[in-house]
Amino acid sequence: MKGISYLGTWVRNWYSIFVNELRLIFSDSGVMVIFFVGGLLYPVLYNLIYMNGTVDEMDVAVVDNSGGAYSRRFIRKVDATRECNILIYCASMEEAKALMQKGTVHGIIYVPEDFDSRLVRGEQGVISTYADMSSFLYYKCLTMGTNLTMLDEMHQIQLERYTASGMDAQAAWQAVQPVLSDESLPYNKPFSYTIFFISAALLLVIQQTMFYGESLLAGTLREQNRSFASMPGKLQGLGIGRVLLGRGAAYFSIYMVTGTLIALLIPWLFRLPQRGEWTDIMVLLLFFVIDCIFFTFTWSSLITRRETVFVLFLSVSPICLFLTGFSWPQTSIPEFWRYVSYIFPSTFGCRAFINLNTAGGSLALIAPEIRAMTIQTAVYYVLSSVSVFIENKVIENKEKIDRLKDKALELRGIDPDEARKVIAGK
């Protein structure tokens, strides 16, 4: 009977904390904006910005000061690529810059006067490119078009030099390209920036909006000298687990819904690849959301001011995004930053989501990421429990010190309330 009574008390306390946390969330307009407007608006906004994902036949201006056979052949090959369209030849860079400023072209290829002469002498030729950075896709197209042409032209020049030295055509070709290679992009054939970027950004939105929203709420409570860390004391020292699980349940109920919309509805709405099973994605969301909850509880314990959240938003989000390894090989990430990446649930959650949704993997494929998130959850649960315990003790000691100060003032014949009014300038 005693065990049943304890369990009933535990459930009632847990439920009261759960309801109170929801009440705090829905009474704070800033938290509401971050959780619901930001959480759903950011994925939509990213997809709208990169709606097409690719830019084909981008208009480019050429300034060819060399005018030789090599420069003309290079420009023709650039024009033949899918990415670039040579719209106009300009007599000077000033003319090309004016066209770019008007928006007539979105890129410039500049060939210096000594380009052909340097290649004839067997030296390295240099070509400069300038892209309109109003969209990253313009830079990507110009860079890809010129780089692919450069590689092809490099092989062609080497082949010409070998044959000119007396080597037969077959031997020269084998010397230029001893190993035949064929490029294949099975999960992103059009090389779409949307598929490349959004797959990593979706789950990061869940982590970041949860952290910023909860930290905003925590900072507000601490500014008002209120905190849930005082709850365990009211529960006779037995309430840390109830506080964490009750508060966590509030965020879990919100973000399982938000996460489902982000991970399943947004890709379907914008016709992104959805090669994974929806049940596997839901399992991933379960582990990821729980991991993010205790990650948030742990680090939000350091937030003492409401405005601190907005400073962190500008500095932490890009770091978290690139540490996922979506734009840089994981094996090439420096060891220091690889260890830093283990702090964030997004490191493993984003990789798992890419493997599931983009590559069409299974739960067995993302088992290492699931294990890593499980370990993170256990570690952050312990750390968040410790932070609640420490803050509770700090609050208790602060209350004792305040009571002792009031008694000291009363012994001197000073009214503590009146003294506070004087100090506050009232």
Image (cartoon, rainbow, N blue to C red):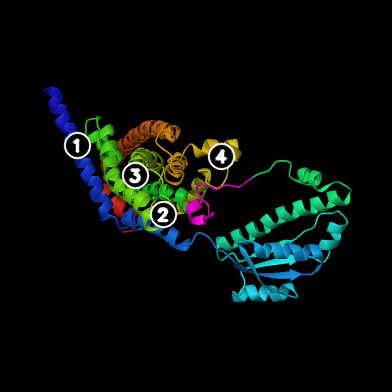
Kind of residue sitting beneath label 3: Trp
Residue 55 screen position, x and y as percent: 55, 63
Q: Mark 3 or mark 4, which is nearer to you?
A: 3
Q: Position of residue 198 (x, y in %)?
A: 46, 53
Residue at 49 percent across and 46 percent down: it is 320
Q: Nearer the viewer, residue 248 or 331?
A: 331
Q: Which residues are magenta?
A: 182-197
Mark 2 → mark 1, Cα distance in angstroms: 31 Å
Q: Is residue 273 visible?
A: yes
The residue pinned by badge 2 equals 307
Quarter holding the N terminus is: top left
Q: Nearer the viewer, residue 424 or 4?
A: 4
The residue at which mark 3 appears reads as 278
For the question of whether residue 412 can be seen, the reply is: no
In the picture, the disc for residue 13 is: 1
**Earlier sequence position, callout 4 versus callout 2:** 2
Q: Which amino acid type is shown beneath numbered disc 1?
A: Asn
Disc 3 packing (10 Å; few <14; some 14–19; many ≥20): some
Element carrying mark 2: loop
In this picture, residue 18 sits left or right of residue 292:
left
Helix, strand or loop at label 3? It is: helix
Locate residue 241, reporting x and y percent: 28, 32
Image quadrant occupied by the C terminus? bottom left
- Which of marks 3 and 1 precedes in the sequence? 1
